[in-house]
Amino acid sequence: MLVIINLFVGSMVGLERTVLPMIGEERFGLLSTSAALSFIVSFGFSKALVNLFAGNLADRAGRKRVLLFGWGIGLFVPIMVIFAQAWWMIIVANVFLGVNQGLTWSMTVNMKVDLAKSTQRGLAVGFNEFAGYLGLAVMASVSGYVASTYSLSPEPFYIGIVLVVLGFLLSLAVRNTEEHVKTQSNEQGD
C-alpha cells in the first residue's frame, strides 16, 4: 500500500513538470528559462527545509498523521495553479508542493523502513524511489498529453486534485508504524 501511495506522491511532481514551463511562457510571458524554472527552485528549497524537520515531527505526531497532513497541504497545489493570476502564485504553489513532498515522500519511505527487516531496508527504500519516480514520469507524460489535447490549465490540474484525494484516502487505510518500531526497539534492547 505504501508503494502505491508513493506512486501518487511522485505523480504530484510529474503533474506540473511538463506543463508549468509552458504556462510560464504562454500565460505569464516569461521569456527567460531561469525565470520559468524558478518554480523548481522554490519546490526544492521548501522540500529540503521540510525534510530537516519531518523525522522529528513524525516522532512527535506520528508518521500517519504527518502523511495525511502532507496530503492536505498537497490539495492547495493544483487549486492554486488553476486559479493563478500571476507567476508568484505558481511559485507559492510550488512551495506547498515542496512541503507536500517533504512530508508525504519522507513518511512513505520511513514507514516502509519501519516495517522492513534490517536486511531489507535498502530494498524498501528502492521500492519507494521506484514508485515515486515512476509516478513522476508517467504523470509528466499524461499531463503533457492532456495539456496538448485540451489546454494548459485547468484540465491537467484536475488530475492533481484526484491524485491528492486518492493519496489521502489510501493513506487513511495504512496502519501507523510506531508500534512496530517500538516492538523492534524492545526486542533489540533485550
Image: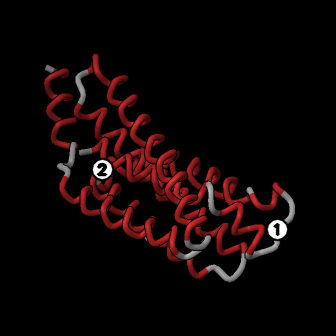
Residue lying at the far front in this picture: please name it: 149
**The C terminus - image quarter:** top left
Provide the residue designation for mark 2: 63
In the rendered structure, the answer to whether residue 84 lies left or right of residue 73 reads right
In the rendered structure, the answer to whether residue 128 lies left or right of residue 175 reads right
Residues marked 2 and 1 touching at CB (< 8 Å)? no
- Type of residue at label 2? Arg
Q: Is residue 136 above or below residue 170?
A: above
Provide the residue designation for mark 1: 30
Q: Is residue 155 above or below residue 169?
A: below
Residue displayed at 55% across by 56% down: 98
Of callouts 2 and 1, the N-terminal one: 1
Q: Quadrant of residue 118?
A: top left
Residue 120 percent location from the top left of the image: 28, 21
**The N terminus - image quarter:** top left
Residue displayed at 45% across by 65% down: 160
Residue displayed at 68% across by 83% down: 85
Mark 2 lies on a secondary structure that is helix
* Residue closest to the eye, 62 or 150: 150
Q: Is residue 4 above or below residue 122?
A: below
Identify the image's colour scheme: rainbow, by chain, secondary structure or one colour. Answer: secondary structure
Residue 82 percent location from the top left of the image: 56, 77
In the rendered structure, the answer to whether residue 25 lies left or right of residue 32 reads left
In the rendered structure, the answer to whether residue 37 lies left or right of residue 15 reads right
In this rendering, the label closer to the viewer, 2 or 1:
1
The crowd level at tag 1 (other Cα within 10 Å; few <14, some 14-19, many 20+) is: some
- Type of residue at label 1? Leu
Residue lying at the far right in this picture: please name it: 32
What numbered label is drawn on residue 77?
A: none
Residue displayed at 62% across by 56% down: 18
Residue 81 percent location from the top left of the image: 58, 73
Q: Disc 2 to disc 1, how far (Cα)?
A: 39 Å
